[in-house]
Image (cartoon, rainbow, N blue to C red):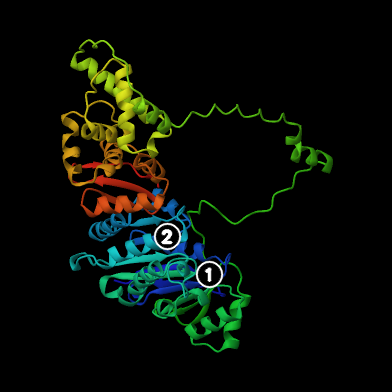
Amino acid sequence: MTILVDMGTDGTGKSVPIDLEELLATRLLVQGNSGSGKSHLLRRLLEKSAGQVQQVIIDPEGDFVTFSEPYGHVVIDGLDHSEREVTRLAERIREHRASVVLNLEGLEAEGQMRCAAAFLSGMFDAPREHWYPALVVVDEAQLFAPTGGGEVSEEVRRASLGAMTNLMCRGRKRGLAGIIATQRLAKLAKNVAAEASNFLMGRTFLDIDMARAADLLGMERRQAEQIRDLQRGTFLALGPAVSRRPVAVKIGDVETSARSGSPKLTPLPEAPPEDMKELLFSFADEAPPPPPPPAPPKRPPSEALMEKLAASVPSPVAALPDKDPEEVETIVADVLRAIVGDADSSMRSAAVLYQDFQVRCRMAGLAPPPLDIAGFTRRLACARAGIFDAPGEDWAPALDLAESLPDDMLGAFLLVARAARENAPCPSDSEIAETYGTSSLGRVRRLLGYIESRDLFVARVDLAGKRSISLPHLGWTTQPAEV
């Protein structure tokens, strides 16, 4: 079945169509400097072929999300999903033949490349029974298939370049027709650009891009210089799906528009220079901020206090009255809350803090103390994680899991477990460091790596750099949060 997509008109006003079936077999490369009309061309092609073939758009700037309402495209926000989830979504897209827009707006360059690589790989690796024909449009393709490494890691560059190469070189047998658009041919990897058999070349000025365009079009350099004279929205078309000879095409109108268009001139404010100066420097007349409150008096080191108490000989005192278990537990919880609330306690050992615990218990009317050093160490770890009352049966599974960890790791483990149990944001490295009793974030990362190596944690960092941690044995997961 032959389906012709009207792209616009040539110099004589004659319609210039693209054969959609031929395009699926031979792929397309669109090139043009910024402002030449590449996005307009892609929009025209997608609008006119909507409903005829599945469409998948990789959109680094969020320009094509407007397709969702008039044409029913599903918008996938890269910020909301991990690489694994993006890969699974890509497999489902091929299975259900859904037209989608992968919106990468808001991600850094490396995040965009990771997301696009995972998405393209998921589509490429779909089962054979799901190899339905689909147009895969990649805008700003030089970002995903660069000639050099740039500012991203080599691992990310290789993954993204490999996915783009698979799309353009091996995608045809899997039903994937790559349509790539780029501002700079010189910045696009040659093995990706060379696989296209159809070309729509827009206005280009740099000699190095002109040379690449001439090579791809099979034209002499002097002939290719006509590309410099093309008007905005006019492209030189060549290829089996368009024309066997180069033809200038003025792209037709589109029904949708991008959320952000080209900048337009607007009148400058008419305020005289004196008024403008007053507006700019008005903050000089503002009242100065109030001085900071005086620092509280520095408390004497608790270690010295503990040494004095340990060296002192207590005078005989009368026996304290017995207390019921609930009252004892309330006093223990209050004492632990006071110890953890001391800003200096996080850097002290459990043995030193146990002396403090004994003193505070005697002051509260508990003698002898209700916990030995081992029991206190365990309760202190729970308190540092925000669990001040005696852990009940609901915490028993988490405590059983932590039996294999050293005692000093128990507080950090329970801090994460508590956040996961409450579905709260994942604790940051600094919060874990305070619970662990260190100021080194490197030690925190090694701590989390050790716990994960024991299969107690599964950490995941999404494309926005936010971390979430799961406890697979318990089915608890934290919310993503900045590390």
Closer to us: 170 or 480: 480
Q: Residue at x 42, y 46 (%)?
A: 439
Mark 2 and mark 1 residues within 8 Å of each other at the beta carbon: no
Observer able to see residue 292 = yes
- How many numbered discs, if any? 2
Closer to us: 7 or 353: 353
Q: Residue at x 30, y 19 (%)?
A: 362
Left or right: where does residue 254 sit relative to residue 83?
Answer: right
Q: Tell me the residue that label 2 is attached to.
A: 112
Q: Position of residue 43 (x, y in %)?
A: 46, 61
Q: Earlier in the sequence, mark 2 or mark 1?
A: 2
Task: Specify the quadrant of the image occupied by residue 286.
Answer: top right
Q: Residue at x 28, y 44 (%)?
A: 409
> Does 462 appear above or below 130?
above
- Mark 1 residue crowding within 10 angstroms, few (<14) / some (14–19) / many (20+): many
Q: Tell me the residue that label 1 is attached to.
A: 183
The amino acid type of the residue labelled 1 equals Gln
Q: Which mark is residue 129?
A: none
Q: Quadrant of the N terminus?
A: bottom left
Closer to us: 34 or 55: 34
Which element type, helix, strand or loop, lies under badge 1? loop
Left or right: where does residue 368 sit relative to residue 2?
Answer: left
